[in-house]
Amino acid sequence: MNRIIPLILAVALFMENMDSTVIATSLPAIAVDIHTSPIALKLALTAYLVSLAIFIPISGWMADRFGAKNVFRAAIAVFILGSVACAISNSLPAFVVSRFLQGIGGAMMTPVGRLVLVRATPKGELVAAMSWLTVPALVGPLVGPPIGGFITTYFTWHWIFLINVPIGLIGIWLATRFLPETDAAETPPLDFTGFVLSGIAASGIVFGLSVVSLPYLPPAIGFITVAGGLVSGILYLLHARRAQNPLLALELFRNQVFRSSVLGGSLFRIGIGAVPFLLPLMFQIGFGLTPFQSGMITFVSAIGAIGMKFVTALIFRLAGFRRVLISGSLVAAGSIAIYGLFTPETPYVLMLAILLVGGFIRSMFFTGVNALSYAEVSAEDTSKATPITAVFQQLSIALGVALAGGILEVSTSIHGGPLTLSDFHTAFFIVAAVSAVASLSFMRLAPDAGNAVSGHGRLSTPKTLEPAMSPGE
């Protein structure tokens, strides 16, 4: 398998993953500098994810219309501009707008890169190909927390965004030099009505859920935007039934395998989306650690994720998607719940071991979910499946951030004081329970679901069983 293309495309994932982990570690310091609260700053995290949810649906159309290589390079350039804007922001509104701009670039980078890879890879090699896509990408979570914590503690948080500038420029050069040229294809007209309705639905729901629990804006605004998002979502469903070429091809959900992978994975990602928000805050506010100390603890999860990638393909070949995803979702949810038992008296060695195992299991789970999404999708439908899976991934992560912030806000309102360690414990227990529900979706899978991709049931070991790493972290 040619690893050059997935490794080049992984530059985008590297920036996105490192950026999100760096920001989570630095939230308290950023909040102090721009005169707001850490909980209010989750609006900036959500703004980025909302931007992804709005613009990801048109990523497939853009790649077909203008050429995937051109769109990929332009997306990196937009992400760089958004990063610079974040670095010079001096207020919460400016920071939120800058993160939204970053999201526009991110909305094109990862889906377009994944689309190029899926189209160029036989299904029998899909797990390994997707895995190599994130070899550098998983270095982002690995180095993000300690680098972000170090810069925030000993320098200033503004520099954590400027890291993206040289990385992005290298990515543009590598894409120009090594990615194959892709010609623009004949595409149907953009479903503009669908784009508007899906964008309002995604942004209204996610933004509204965040605002409801924010002290920065009146809760009524949150309820109104959530209602508007739900109405727009219903209108889009009605529109998609009549449109000749709808923006999101919802008919793919008629396939049980695709439906289970998308819906089950989305439920699980709600918990995963909450963890990067909750864990650094708990270590800094509940334990009294510095951002650098917090980052040196949380980065261990990425080591576990990287380690698991080298045996994931073998595990799925031996046990199959159904068994691994059911057990993996339950065990991984349990690892999130254990975070709710951490206290300042917990030995650091024990915490590091638990975080390592948690990253190990979650990595395996995401490898399977991402590969299973394409297991029964035809080659001509990959451009339709890619934006759907990406939208649901980002929406679920955004909902996880909104849920985590809402739990903390409600908890502090109940006891009438500042954030305490018990508030974080409660949040971890709740988001773990939500993630565990994902197992129900995978129980509906047939025992042989996705065997063409995993190789389960074959008498011989397929050549695709190479050290594996996959997207979705």
Image (cartoon, rainbow, N blue to C red):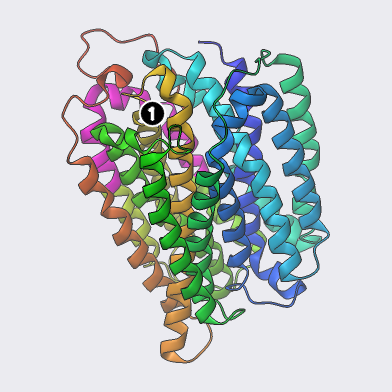
Tell me where residue 215 appears, x and y as whole percent.
Answer: 58, 81
Query: Residue sitting at 55 percent across and 31 percent down?
Result: 60
- Tell me if residue 78 comes above or below residue 407 in the rendering: above
Foreground residue among 85 and 310: 85
Whether residue 470 is visible here, answered yes or no, is no
Query: Residue sitting at 66 percent across and 46 percent down?
Result: 104
Q: What amino acid type is highlighted by mark number 1?
A: Ala
Q: Is residue 6 left or right of residue 179?
A: left
Q: Which residues are magenta?
A: 302-329
Tell me where residue 72 appears, x and y as whole percent.
Answer: 67, 29
Name the outermost residue toward the bottom. 416
Residue labelled with disc 1: 371
How many C-alpha atoms fall within 10 Å of the one at disc 1: few (<14), some, or many (≥20)?
Answer: many
Query: Looking at the rendering, which quadrant does residue 458 occupy?
Result: top left
Foreground residue among 228 and 368: 228
Query: Residue sitting at 72 percent across and 75 percent down?
Result: 32
Secondary-structure class at tag 1: helix
Q: Is residue 3 left or right of residue 348?
A: right
Look at the image and say whether residue 287 sits in the magenta stretch: no
Query: Residue sitting at 64 percent across and 76 percent down?
Result: 37
- Tell me if residue 142 comes above or below residue 113 in the rendering: below
Tell me where residue 396 appears, x and y as whole percent.
Answer: 43, 53
Q: Is residue 145 left or right of residue 193?
A: right
Tell me where residue 352 appears, x and y as whole percent.
Answer: 47, 53
Query: Looking at the rendering, which quadrant does residue 351 occupy?
Result: bottom left
- Tell me if residue 275 comes above or below residue 461 in the rendering: below
Look at the image and say whether residue 317 sits in the magenta stretch: yes
Whether residue 268 is visible here, answered yes or no, is yes
Foreground residue among 144 and 257: 257
- Tell me if residue 205 comes above or below residue 259 in the rendering: below
